[in-house]
Image (cartoon, rainbow, N blue to C red):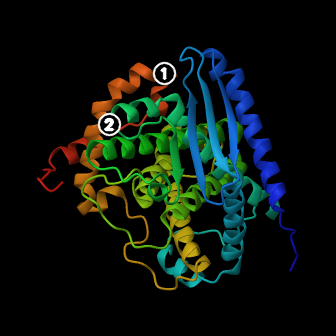
Amino acid sequence: MLQVNQLLDNEIIDLTCQVFSTIVDDLNNGLYKDINGEISVRWSIREVFYAWAAVDITDESTPKHYVGLTYETVVLLYRDVEAYFKYIESGIDNDKFDTIFQDFEYPKSLSLASSLEDCKKNMFISGITWLFFHELGHLVQEHGIVRQEYGCGVRMDIVDCASNDNVTNQLLTGKASAVSHVTEIAADYFATISCLRALARHFDGSVFDEEVRSFSVALALVLYRFHGTESFTPMSKPKGSHPIPLIRLEQTQPLIFEVYSKLNVQETLNSSLSRLDMINITSWSSYTVGLFWLRKNRHFEIPEDYFIAGSMQRHEMLPYHKHILEVWDEIKPRIDEVKRIDDEYSELQFSPHYRNILENIVLGSGN
C-alpha cells in the first residue's frame, strides 16, 4: 500500500494560518471595511478543543472583532480527518453500510477526483472554515450584547468548547440558558449558510459534488467531537450554555439539501447530485462519523439514540424546540438593532411548517 506522509503539527497550524489569513483579508477588505471595523485571529496554547469570539468594546463605531482558537483544536481536527479516512478505506463496517444504505451507492473510497492528501486537506479546511464562520456569526450578529442583556455572563466573549460549562464554570438556567442555546444555533446556521455559499461560488461539476460530501463529513466530525461517546439525553427545555451537539447536527445537515435544492445545482453548477443524493450523503456522513468516533475511542457498544434522527422525529424534544423558536422570536428584534450586517439569508429561519408543528405543543410547568 502506498504510504502517505502525515502532516506534522506545525504544518497543520501553518495550513490553518494560510486559510484564516485569506478569510481575514477578504473580510477586512469587504465586510469590515464597510462597517469601519477590523477582524483578526487570536491563538491560545491551552490543550483543549476550544474556540471563542471576542469584541474590543472601547469604541463601538469602529468594532474590533477577534476569532480565537487553540492550536490543539486544529491539530485534533486534522488528526480526526486522517483517522476517518483510514477508517473508511479499511471497509471495516461496510457490512453495516450495505444494510443501512442499500439503496444508496455510498463511497468506499474518499479520494475520487483529487489525491488522498488533497482530499484530507480539503475536508480539514471545510471543518476549520465552519468553526471560523460560527464565531463570525456570533460577532456580526452581536450575540455577546444580547447574551449580556439576558444575564448569560458579565463578559461579551463567547466560548465554544467540548466541555464548555466546565471551562467557564457557568451552568446557565432559565431564560439565560435559552438565549445562549438559540444564539449558538443561530451561529451554526450562519456558518453553514456561509460555507454552502462559498462552495457554490468556487466549485462546479464533479469537484463541487466531492466538496459537498467533504463538507458534510467535516461538519459531522466537528459536532461529534463536541458530543463524545455518550448516549443522547433529551431535554424539554434549554439547560447550560450549548445545545446538544446531535441536535445541532440535525439542524445543520439538512441545510445542505435545502439550500442546494433551491439553487438547483444540477442546472446552475452542472452537479450530478439530486436532492435525494444529498439527503443520502448527509445521512451517510453523519452515521459513518458516529461509528468512526466510537471506534476511535474504543467504545464498542453503541450508546442509546446515538445517531441523528431528524429534529421532528425526537418527539420528546419538541418542547425544547418550541422554547428555541419562542426565544428567537423574542430576541430577533434586538439582534436587528445591533447586528453589523443586514443579510437575512444567513440569519436563522424557521419554516411555516415547522412553526405550525410547534404551535400545538403545550409547555407544562416542568418545562
Q: Is residue 229 left or right of residue 270?
A: left
Residue drawn at the location 70% of the way across and 80% of the way down: 90
Circle 1 residue: 342
Task: Identify whether 352 is placed above or below 109.
Answer: above
Task: Identify whether 354 is placed above or below 26.
Answer: below
- Pick whichever, 24 or 353, lies toward us: 24
- Residue 186: assigned label: none
C-alpha span from label 1 to label 2: 17 Å
Q: Is residue 85 left or right of residue 189?
A: right
Quarter of the rendering containing residue 195: top right
Looking at marks 1 and 2 on the same chain, the residue that comes earlier in the sequence is marked by 2
Q: Residues within 10 Å of mark 2 (few under 14, many from 20)?
A: many
Asked whether residue 352 appears in the rendered view, the answer is no
Q: Position of residue 13 (x, y in %)?
A: 78, 52
Figure quadrant of the N terminus = bottom right
Q: Is residue 186 left or right of residue 24?
A: left
Q: Position of residue 200 (x, y in %)?
A: 63, 39
User: In the structure shown, which secondary structural element does the residue marked by tag 2 occupy?
Assistant: helix
Residue drawn at the location 40% of the way across and 51% of the way down: 170
Q: Position of residue 16 (x, y in %)?
A: 75, 48
Residue drawn at the location 61% of the way across and 29% of the way down: 65
Q: Which three-letter amino acid code belongs to the residue tagged 1?
A: Asp
Residue drawn at the location 51% of the way across and 22% of the way down: 340
Figure quadrant of the C terminus = bottom left
Circle 2 residue: 328
Q: Residues within 10 Å of mark 1 (few under 14, many from 20)?
A: few
- Pick whichever, 302 or 253, lies toward us: 302
Q: Which three-letter amino acid code belongs to the residue tagged 2?
A: Trp
